[in-house]
Amino acid sequence: MVIMDPIPYGKHDVTDEDIKAVIDVLHSSNLTQGPKIREFETAFAEYVGAKYAVTVSNGTAALHLSAMALNVKPGDKVITTPITFVASANCVRYCRGEVVFADIDPETFLLDINKVKELLAGADHKTFKGIIPVNFAGYPVDLEAYRQLADEYGLWLIEDACHAPGGYFRDSKGEKQGCGNGNFADLSVFSFHPVKHIAAGEGGMITTNNERLYRRLLNLRTHGIQQDPGKWIENHGPWYYEMQELGFNYRLTDIQAALAISQLKRASQNLKKRQQIAQRYDAAFKNTPIETPKIKEGVCHAYHLYVVCSKKRDALFNYLRQLNIMVQVHYIPVHCQLYYRNQGWKKGDLPVAEDFYQQCLSIPMYPTLTDDEQNYVIQKISAFFD
Ligand SMILES: *Cc1c(COP(=O)(O)O)cnc(C)c1O
């Protein structure tokens, strides 16, 4: 018997305070290109511990501009994980670079650094230009290790941190290294799609400690128009603007920024809520055949998703959906998507990722999930295995 309204795997939470913040912008004179943009960038940079932040229209735009700012060119090879949303790879293709997928680590489900090392040790390593590790599900990648590897081969690093604002790993000295803090990655990207931690409707962010890349991103976000008048070649008068390279309109509106600023105020609190929910799941499934996430000590997982693994995934998926528990599968390995198969990738290329895909299931994880709802989920999953 179905006893509840559908319980999604993820859900945004918009409060009256959030709504008031949006209305205030609607009453103001700037719907876009106003003060909320800088305000959001400053607050977000502080939240993740980075020097600079550039907000853009969505996470995919953040990835695209990052690839452009790092000069990805036709033929350049970039390594990423197949267990991610397609956008992590697509940004390379927008610049006509070549995506090289490496398999995942069977414990963490993150890009396997040993597989990346194997690729780079190959004869043609000079065509590799960068690596895009992804904090899949909210598990922070050990970027210190990736930085070392990248430096060895002269590569750049884009951290796809869309799942992990507020998460951190510990470096070799035991120091906390927050996702997107700019200490190791050249650029880090975030998304404010409603299913992510901070909802702006649509929205994205790039954080960095590199001032040159920061300035370039500001220009690329607005058509390639030089934002610093001191760098103009000419100046015809007060109306003048100078487009120096080809960019896009990837701006966020002030309406979205106001919503995001208001949401950001609850980000720490919501992250704690996600971690509490994860702890309850961890404990509840301890003695079941369900495999729960295995997290290295000292790592702060941001739990965008709570992903379990089961050999009976398909049956479990159908059973839970029938009970109005709207579980989901994250992700179909990107190299198995038709587009990438047309680029030469095939099933069987990355066996660990493909095996994970057969078993993974994202169960409800969001800050407003109630105890009753979570109990219902736990009870139904446990009953499935009885
Ligand atoms: C959501 C997501 C993106 C893209 O963000 P959008 O804002 O939807 O464009 C990129 N990478 C990952 C890992 C994501 O989850």
Image (spheres, rainbow, N blue to C red):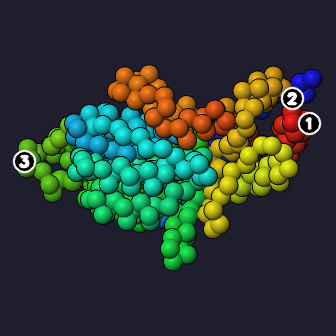
Residue located 49% across and 32% down the image = 348
Residue located 45% across and 55% down the image = 114
Residue 81 on image: x %, y %: 46, 43
**Which one is earlier in the sequence, the residue at label 3 or at label 1?**
3
- Please tell me which residue lies in front, 78 or 20: 78
Q: Is residue 302 above or below residue 33?
A: below
The answer for how far apart the CA atoms under marks 2 and 3 are is 65 Å
Q: Which residue is mark 2?
A: 4
Q: Is residue 262 left or right of residue 55?
A: right
**Which one is earlier in the sequence, the residue at label 2 or at label 1?**
2
- Please tell me which residue lies in front, 51 or 374: 374
Q: Residues within 10 Å of mark 3 (few under 14, many from 20)?
A: few
Q: Are marks 2 and 3 in contact (CB under 8 Å)?
A: no
* Badge number at residue 386: 1
Q: Which residue is mark 3?
A: 234
Residue located 31% across and 63% down the image = 151
Q: Are marks 3 and 1 in contact (CB under 8 Å)?
A: no
User: Which image quarter: residue 299?
Assistant: bottom right
Nearest to viewer (mark 3 / mark 1): 1
